[in-house]
Image (tube, helix red, strand yellow):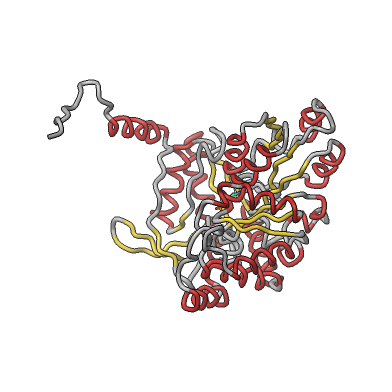
Amino acid sequence: MFPIKTARLSSMPYDNFFEQELSILKTEGRYRVFADLERHAHKAPIASWYSKDGKKPVVVWCSNDYLGMSHHPLVIEAATKAATTYGAGSGGTRNISGTGHLHVELENTVAKLHEKEAGLVFTSGYVANEATLCTLAKGLPNCVAFCDERIHASMIQGISHSRVPKHIFSHNNLEQLRQQLDSYPLNQPKIIAFVSVYSMEGDFAPIEAICDLAKEYNALTYLDEVHAVGIYGKGGAGLANALGQSHRIDIIQANFAKAYGVIGGYITGSKSLVDYVRSFASGFIFTTSLPPMVTSAAISSINVLQQADDLRQKLWSNVNLLKNLLSKTKVNYHHTPSHIVPVVIGNAKICKDFTDTLLHDFGIYVQPINYPTVPRGQERLRLTVTPFHNEEMIKDMTNALALLWEKFFMLKAG
Ligand SMILES: Cc1ncc(COP(=O)(O)O)c(C=O)c1O
């Protein structure tokens, strides 16, 4: 017989702890409520929202499926065919029994896209960043990392896990980056980690100038092109490609989850660098590889977007229409150079109320963006129009924003 343990008075009240922490988020208006949505393969940007009064149609304005590739007929066909031909799963980690010919094909496709010697596929863009940055920073002797303050959480995690010294430079501040680089000997390994299209700001990195600094100070360049591939550059090869800088970037990272409409991440670079990451990165080695339907859909999507200038043109004409209409209102939007249009609200509670009203009263779905995704006081909506929003939807959205801006800011202030 085992003695029956009685609860000690001092035992940890786990659930109380979790509830208390969550109630702080609720009080601050930062508690995340996910809209219960159903996307439809051929109706985007219209989705169904499971509201408490039943299912309702809504227009989605915050999807990262920027070009609607998740419902492109050839991509769906590639996924379906691969599942019926090769099965639903990959069979294991790449090292055990999970490397398939489609992984090899996908890696060759991304390497070619970015004009690099090699590519390596991961289960997500997050994992690609985390695993690669951690492995490189930890592996290179006495490495130091330099990061733009607005890089993605996955890049920060990778560098933090490597435990190397890191310097954060303020957003796109080249002078500060130079000062930081200047305090280290030329022969000490360095990595500069940055993003081409910053997803919350919708602005661009000064890629050429960062490459100049990297060359001057003998640093590796690591560029996240997650929000750029498929949209910018020749055949969607990214912003570095558009600016003629791809060959100066040592590691181009991106994913298949935004403009390519599927899931998964990757890096491209020199043969030896990619082989090093393949051989040492825990996040690559010890996890099951992407299934055939995903790899096949990703290859198809990249191939389609290499020839899809018409789709990109439609995207840009919608982006321009949205910005043009917003410019005639009082709405505090950022006139960005990119396809992403932030509307800064500056308060978590108002941001939530604002998006709730858009959803309930106008049938428009935009997720509020709060701390820690953006700094406190920078809470915002992040609008993403696609080639599939029609003129009426864009006008409706602008009118709704203008009306609510009046209601939430002008009337209250007055
Ligand atoms: C800049 C950036 N990098 C990486 C990621 C992670 O990519 P994934 O969603 O494929 O994990 C994201 C995701 O939102 C991102 O915005």
Please determine whether, in this image, residue 122 is positioned above or below residue 73: above
**In the rendering, at what x and y percent does residue 24 appear?**
38, 31
**In the rendering, at what x and y percent does residue 12 appear?**
28, 26
Q: Residue furthest right?
A: 216
**In the rendering, at what x and y percent does residue 47 appear?**
44, 65
The foreground one among 49 and 15 is: 15
Placement of the N terminus among the 4 image quadrants = top left
The residue at 69%/72% (across/down) is 308
Judge whether residue 391 can be spotted in this image: no
Which quarter of the figure has residue 175? top right
**In the rendering, at what x and y percent does residue 43 appear?**
48, 71
The foreground one among 309 and 73 is: 73
Q: Residue furthest left?
A: 1
The residue at 44%/43% (across/down) is 352
The residue at 60%/70% (across/down) is 101
Please determine whether, in this image, residue 342 is positioned above or below residue 294: above
